[in-house]
Image (cartoon, helix red, strand yellow):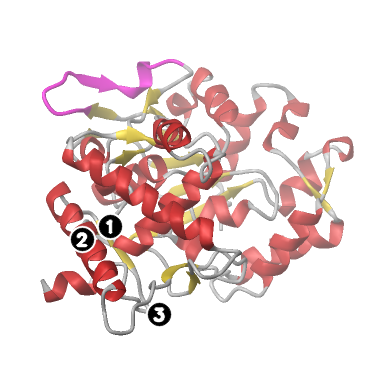
Amino acid sequence: MGELSKNSILFSDQHLCHADILPPSEVRARIEVAILNFLKNLNSSNPEVTDLPLISRKMGNSRVRRGLLTDDSKIFLSHSFSTKSLMNENTANSFIRVWKVMEMCYQILVQEKKVTQRELFYKLLCDSPHYFTSQLQVNRTIQDLVALVRCSRYSLGIMASSRGAVAGRLLLQEPNQEIVDCSTCGSSGYVISGDLNLLENLVMKSDARYIIVVEKHAIFQRLAEDRVFNQIPCILITAKGYPDIGTSRLLLHRMSREFPELPILGLVDCTPVLYLISKKTTPSCNVKWLGLRKDDIEQLVPEESLIPLKPRDHQIAKSLSSSEILQDKYKEELSFMVQSGQRAEIEALYFHGFDFLAKYIGKKIVQADYI
């Protein structure tokens, strides 16, 4: 019980925080200990409502954005915290939301069910309309609860919606199911489940030589439809935008373990967010940035296709430029974007024809033109 108390929401290590992947019984036990400790403080000789230590969401807290699987049982969260207090007018509602979501997750675990974040939002909207008015509030509160109880979102009974897809030279077999050939799944690819247990138990076989992480689903569909994996022996994977845990952090992590000899290449827009998507998709894997990059902008993208940087782009660029985890070659690319004041999207390459994208990727891979 003493060790469990350290993992409760009342234990705040300001230097290191991991979220364990736990069975329902252990998660329920952590929630119960948290509640007991909370009540104990209220009934003490000097009663108080304990503040909640939460992950800081400031731009400078770069390690939050580096959330990754450090091994098979933990997810690294952060070393920088802020607090939420019931006594503070600005954070009181957030404080209450954490307890509301904790209560709901406990009920889900008792019932041995799994729900998506969207399902959880509608349930909370009906039960606590004064505290939950948007999906964003629910999503952020779930993140807070993960940090407080120190267990993964999936361990809380919350699963990701099926967002990602995989295609190409990969054979997958779910437990007690037939083998799926991902090269025959069409332009939509094989839909990646939000069930983390299922992803962890997938049987994989491949004769690919590369794994290509594609930022945009539309680009993924183009490459899958063109069957680029027949020309370049590769596996294509996408999270349809910003990576979720199910797609990029676990499935890609698993593929990197299963096929450690395969280079992992990122195909993303040329924007300051490139680092957040390309490198932070799965920081535990060595993701190389294939494109779009500075040379592509200068040689292949027509001026009419360039897009002015937004204020948020400049804000992200400033934050990344001062980051110690950004390698020099990335900083050079970032500096080019800031100085030019422009960004470019992968679709700009269609100026050369719809079949150009496969040629572009093939040439860069042959020349080992990635960083």
Q: Identify the residue position indicated by label 2 in the image.
A: 30
The residue sitting at 52% across, 56% down in the picture is 93
Q: x%, y% of residue 316?
A: 69, 61
Asked if the residue at tag 3 contacts the one at tag 1, i.e. Cβ–Cβ closer than 8 Å, the answer is no
Q: Quadrant of the N terminus?
A: bottom left
Residue 130 visible in this rendered orientation of the protein: yes
- On the picture, is 235 further left or further right than 88? left
Left-right relation of 50 to 85: left
Q: 132 above or below 8?
A: above
> Is residue 175 magenta-colored?
yes
Q: Say if 50 sits above or below 102 in the image.
A: below
Which x, y percent locates residue 43? Answer: 26, 74
Q: Cα distance, mark 1 to mark 3? A: 17 Å
- Residue type marked 2: Arg
* Residue 126 at x, y percent in the picture: 45, 31
Q: CA distance from mark 1 to mark 2?
A: 9 Å
Span shown in magenta: 173-186
